[in-house]
Every structure is written in C-alpha cells, then in structure tokens.
Image (cartoon, helix red, strand yellow):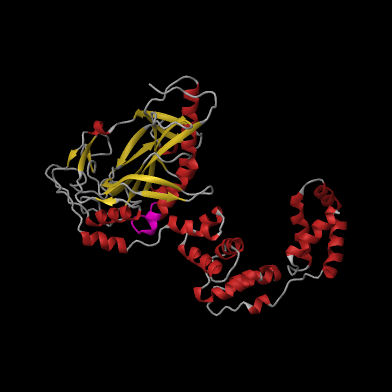
Amino acid sequence: MTAPVNKSTGEWEPVIGLEIHVELKTRTKMFCRCETSFGLEPNVRTCPVCLAYPGTLPVANGQAIEWTIKLGLAIGSKIADRALFARKNYFYQDLPKGYQISQYEAPLCIGGRFVVPGPEGASEIRINRAHLEEDAAKTIHVGGVEGRIVGAEHSLVDFNRGGTPLMEIVSEPDIHSAEEAKRFLQLLRQTVVELGISDAEMEKGTLRCDANISVRPSGASELRTRCELKNMNSFNFIARGIEAEIARQIELYESGGEVQQETYDFDAASGTLTAHRSKEEAQDYRYFPEPDLVPYEPAPALIERLKAEIPELPAARLTNLIELGFGFDDALVLNEEKYWVDYATILVVEHDLDPRAVASALINDYRAKNVRPPFEIANQVAETIRKKSEMPKNVYQEAVGASGSSSFSAIEYTSQTAISDTSELDPLIDRIITANPGQVEQYRGGKQGLLGFFVGQVMKETGGKANAKVVSELIHNKLSG
C-alpha cells in the first residue's frame, strides 16, 4: 500500500539513485587474456573463457582490481579487507555463461560520499558501494528506434565486449532533481577520466547509467516504489528521461493509481517511456560465491600507493573556484580542464583580477581560440586582461594570439589605447544615429538589444579602435535622452 497522497499542495519530491557502469580501459578482459576493443568486427575478440566453454577457469585482472580500489579511495569508500566475487545468475542472450561474475555481499569498495557543487550550494550524495564485475556482450537490435529492442525486427549479439572489466558505482537515493543527477554524473565521469581508469564515453557505451526513480510528498521520509530507466547514453537524455519519469509517477499518483516496479526505456526523440520488464530484486539473481576465484585481500602497501596517486579531484577544484568568486556556470567550464583552473586561480589570487573578468577572458578569448599561455608569463596575461577595455579590440585579439609564446610582452599591446575621447566620438555617433532612424525608433520602443547594433557601427567606422564601453555609454545616453 502507498501512503496517502497530499493533494492539497500538489508538491512532490523526487527521490533518485543512480547505478553507473564504467568500462575500465585495461588491455585485457576481466577474467581472460582477450584484448579489449571498440569498433572492431563483431565476435573477433573472444576465447573459450569469455564464451564459457566447459572446463575453462577465470583468472582475475589485477589492474582492474587496483583501478576499482583507486576510484573507491577517491570517493571516500572503505576498501574491503576481504572482497569476494559472486555468480549473479540470470539468462539472457548476451550472457553465454548464464551468469555474470560480479560482487554482492563483499564488494571491493563500501560506502563513500561525493560532494556535488551547485548554483544553490553543494549537496552531498552518499555512495552505497563500488564493485567490479564483467560486462555482458552487446546486443544489437535491428529495426528498432535508435537501436532499442522496442519495435526491433531481430537482435544480434556481438561478444567482443563480453568479459570487459566493468565497475559499478551505486549511489544512495540522495538525489532530488534531474539537474542534480546530471551534475553528479558529469563530475563523476570527469573524476573517472582524470584518474586514468576509463575514457568513460557515453556514445561508445564505456559509461552507462541506470536511474532508479520514485516520488513522495514533500516533507515525507518514506521510500516509495521505484522504477528504473536503463542504459541512457547522454547527460541530457538522462536528465530528460528522469524528468519524464517523475512527471509520469506524479500524474499516476494524483489520478489515484499506484506505481508498479518496472524497468523503462526512454526514447529521446519522442520523449516517451516504454516499459519492457518488471524490475528484479537481488534474490531473483540467486547470488552465491564464485567457486573458481579465491577471495581478494588488498595489501595495505597497495592501498597507500594508490592513495598517493590520486590527484586533486574535479569536485574539489570546482568548489575552490566558487569560493574564489567565480560564477557557477563559469566555474563549470573552467573546471573541464585543470590547466584553466590553475591559470584562473593564479590570475585572481596572485594578480588580484576580478573573477568575472578572468572567466570572460579565459573562456571567450583564450580557450575559445585554443591559446594556452605559459604559466611563467601569467603576469603579462594579467596585465593584458586588466587593460582589455582600454585597448582597441583588434589589438587585444592580437595580444591574445601572441600570448601563447613565453616571450610575450603585454606592453607592446597595452600601450595602444582605444579611442575614448568624447569630442572625437560624439560627431561620429550623432552621424550614425541620424543615418538609422528606424533602429532608433525600435530602440526607444523597447528593443534594447539594438544598442549592440549602434556600438558595432561605431567600431566599424573606427576600425575597432574605439573604447566599446565608452561608446556604449554615450549611445545609451543619447538615445535615452
């Protein structure tokens, strides 16, 4: 039975947990010596072990185990003293054994936490576990929408992927919006990539995500019946799929119905959800310890070595940028690469530049043009950004392009000041206003965006040498008078 629905307020709280599957980029598969691959002809990277021929025995991939521990350390998990592999029994065409070697009662990584900075402040998402298993083969549905099983004419199986090391990270149901789920997944992906353990590319299937979703009245603490969205392959589709499922459940509850525990596909093209099977529980898989693999007991020295290899993580960098005064959206863009984070931090902390000016320059000028100034000339870059508004636009752009060299000197460019003399600009502005009566009328009628048109005309007439800020103020005053 579900709890009574609070219809009087119509307020609902989504409750979301994610299961993230990450293919590790080891040279060989999890339990055999077949090389891992992407994009090869189907069924060319197989052997008797990964195809489950009788009499074959698995041997665990040590690199995959180390990388899983490394991720666990990065997200604050407790590393198990003794981890066990288990058989997860189910029958499907992409699973030649009839079971998957996974971990259940004794995973490698237990618990943990992941801080997700956001525009309204940071949220903390608890991690239930991170464990290691082998991936299934790839089922190719022919004739279905976007390669999905719904509407497919027939299905084919490519066993190249079968047996690839697969790390699964399971969050607690601590996520309460589609946007928060998207940010969490993006930061977790970036963490995985920077740790060097996976390319985590959703379009290749090396990062896949299932979302478990339920809704409850705001203020309630209960966990209601959940539904699962399977194998979504882009951050935006994940967010859209979660939003669609939240809306479906709310509509169902408010119409007097009850949510059934099911698994859904989300079709991004049409925005529709399609149920295709009931959701299994753990007991349905009949887990038991894998008899052909001994327990794994990580050595303390190994754990200490892996701890020392963990760099500053993306979530921590993002938090630091926000604390320095960068806007959330700017911080997100800069945080995509550590180089830009470091450069932005130097410009603000050591050269006392305004974070907004730094973000605008690094993102729109330097990064957009793929100009990466050396750190040893950060003082020259700081001077260039500081004097940006005083320089003709074309001169500033030349300075940006030249700053990729360690011999760059700002004075050569900053000494060329923009035209700011109102006695020189006023006649030109008056002539442009007189020549464009239609745009003047529209601007005064409320179309404020036309200010950029007038500024652009002045810049064109002066060959980009006018001070755009001064020009903008002069035009605004004339047209508002």
Q: Is residue 160 visible?
A: no
Which residue is at a point 37% across and 49% down the rendered structure image? 113
For the residue pair 210 and 124, the one nearer the viewer reads as 124
* Whether residue 372 is situated above or below residue 280 in the rendered picture: below
Residue 417 on image: x %, y %: 72, 74
| In the image, residue 323 lies in the stretch drawn in magenta | no
For the residue pair 465 and 480, the one nearer the viewer reads as 480
The residue furthest top is: 256
Q: Is residue 214 visible?
A: yes
Which residue is at a point 22% across and 41% down the rendered structure image? 105
Residue 280 on image: x %, y %: 30, 31
* Whether residue 459 is situated above or below residue 445 in the rendered picture: below
For the residue pair 217 and 255, the one nearer the viewer reads as 217
- Dominant secondary structure, magenta: loop
Residue 419 on image: x %, y %: 77, 71
Q: Is residue 122 left or right of residue 260?
A: right
The residue furthest left is: 55
Residue 452 on image: x %, y %: 74, 56
Q: Which residues are magenta?
A: 191-201
| In the image, residue 199 lies in the stretch drawn in magenta | yes
Number of marks: 0
Q: Is residue 21 left or right of residue 438?
A: left
